[in-house]
Each structure stands twice: as C-alpha cells, then as structure tokens.
Image: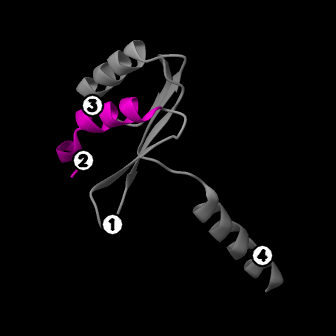
Amino acid sequence: MEYFLAGSFIALFVFIAIDRPILLIKFKDGEIIKTRGKIPHGLLHDCAEIAKRNPITGTVKVYRNRFKPVKLVISKSIDNKAQQRIRNVFPYKSFK
C-alpha cells in the first residue's frame, strides 16, 4: 500500500510539475534557436523578423486552457515593444 501511495504522489508531482506548452519558440541574440509544436508558418516568419529587428533573448510559450482557447506567455527578458509585436502577429483564431 505504501508503494502505491508513493508512486501515486510521484506521478501526480510529475504531472503537475512538468511544463507542457503546445507551442514553444526560443530566441537567443535575435535568432530562433529552438521550436516545438505545430507552429503556423506565418507566425514563425513574423517572429524571426521581429527578432532580427530587435535582438531579443527569451521564450514564447502557448498553453491550451480550459477557459480561453490559448494562453500566450512571453518571458520577461523580451522587452515590452517586442512583446506587443509578437502579441499582434499571434494567430489566436487558428488555435480554437
């Protein structure tokens, strides 16, 4: 019984603790270094252009949410002007 409880707690902790975005874009010094998930081609192109104009370092993550279709999370290391540009080009309607 103790092994079952210990295994359950470990499984629950792993399920809650692991970060599972449906889309991930990592920037480093104005270049896209890592992508994960099914990224619309237009978004990838626009993000690469934004990163070239303003050399940014950080991440953009998209989470599926129960209450909203998607939740866009942009790291704090990206300046506010670039964050707003990424929000403007993000295709919210394609993630419904």
Q: Earlier in the sequence, mark 3 or mark 2?
A: 3
Instruction: Specify whether 36 is left or right of 77.
Output: left
Residue position for label 1:
66
Q: Which residues are magenta?
A: 79-96
Residue position for label 2:
95
Q: Earlier in the sequence, mark 2 or mark 4?
A: 4
Q: CA distance from mark 3 to mark 4?
A: 41 Å
Question: Is residue 43 part of the magenta span, yes or no?
Answer: no
Front disc: 1 or 4: 1
Q: Position of residue 49 (x, y in %)?
A: 33, 16
Q: Earlier in the sequence, mark 3 or mark 1?
A: 3
Mark 2 belongs to which amino acid? Phe
Main secondary structure along the magenta-highlighted residues = helix
User: Can residue 39 be seen?
Assistant: no
Q: Locate the N terminus by quadrant.
A: bottom right
Q: CA distance from mark 1 to mark 2?
A: 13 Å
Mark 1 belongs to which amino acid? Arg
Residue position for label 4:
6
Of the pair 55 and 80, the residue shown nearer to us: 80
Q: Position of residue 43 (x, y in %)?
A: 28, 28
Mark 4 belongs to which amino acid? Ala
Helix, strand or loop under label 4: helix
